[in-house]
Image: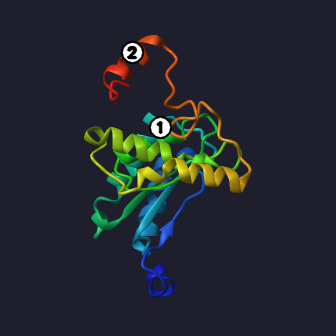
Amino acid sequence: RLDALGRPLCDDADFSPEEASRSDPAFLHEVLVAAVEAGATTLNIPDTVGYAVPDEYYALLSGIRAAIARLPGADRIVLSAHCHDDLGLAVANSLAGIRAGARQVECTVNGIGGRAGNAALEEIVMALQARRSFFGVSTGSATCQTARSSRLVAQRTGSRVAPNKAIVGTNAFAHEAGIHQDGVIKHRLTY
């Protein structure tokens, strides 16, 4: 049991079943319930090879939330999203996970990570801030440091940020269309 072995050493016991998004849901629920009963306080749900689409990932986390709902202390169990970007859906899947109840997201600055990378921290944070009324959650992140963090990570890792990358790319806030430029000149919040 985690309570006897691990809990005295840490406040949070994280359980992460490899390739959860492609697992049999009934078996996954059984394993996750057993993990919670053994003392797990965070259930990290990986889309290990980036295969899920947002509707599937939402359903997966919703199903997990329902499966653990009957357990004592279920309201204190943290669901965590861990999405890879192999199909370019890591951010969308992470946001779907948040809508389904995830309150922790494992992500990386600039989306760096193995193969095609992980969910991009800056995209998730800005989506939650820009669409706060839709998602109903906030992060407390210092968004004024986003570009600086991105540049630092790019410099230290040697990973160039694409100019058209959302949020931190050099073209992210550039407007070429005349109608966009006219709108911004008239009122800077137009776009």
> Tag 1's secondary structure?
helix
Question: Depth-wise, is mark 1 or mark 2 nearer the camera?
Answer: 2
Decide: is 177 above or below 133.
above
Mark 1 touches mark 2? (CB < 8 Å): no
Residue 184 % position (x, y): 37, 23
Give the residue type at disc 1.
Ala
Residue 108 % position (x, y): 57, 53
Q: Which mark is residue 92?
A: 1
Cα distance between the residues tagged 1 and 2: 31 Å
Residue drawn 29% across and 42% down? Answer: 132
Residue 146, can we see it? yes
The chosen color scheme is: rainbow
Residue behind mark 2: 182
- The foreground one among 32 and 104 is 104
Residue 75 % position (x, y): 28, 63
Number of residues whose C-alpha sits closer than 10 Å to that of mark 2, classed few (under 14), some (14–19) or many (20 or more): few
Q: Give the mark nearest the N terminus, 1 or 2.
A: 1
- The foreground one among 106 and 159 is 159
Give the residue type at disc 2.
Asp
> Tag 2's secondary structure?
helix
Residue drawn 47% across and 81% down? Answer: 10
Number of residues whose C-alpha sits closer than 10 Å to that of mark 1, classed few (under 14), some (14–19) or many (20 or more): many
Q: Is residue 154 left or right of residue 8?
A: right
Residue drawn 55% across and 54% down? Answer: 149
Residue lying at the far front of the rendered structure = 185
- The foreground one among 168 and 131 is 168
- The foreground one among 127 and 155 is 155
Q: Is residue 69 left or right of residue 57?
A: left
Decide: is 131 above or below 186.
below
* Quadrant location of the C terminus in the rendered image: top left
Q: Which mark is residue 24?
A: none
Residue 79 % position (x, y): 40, 58
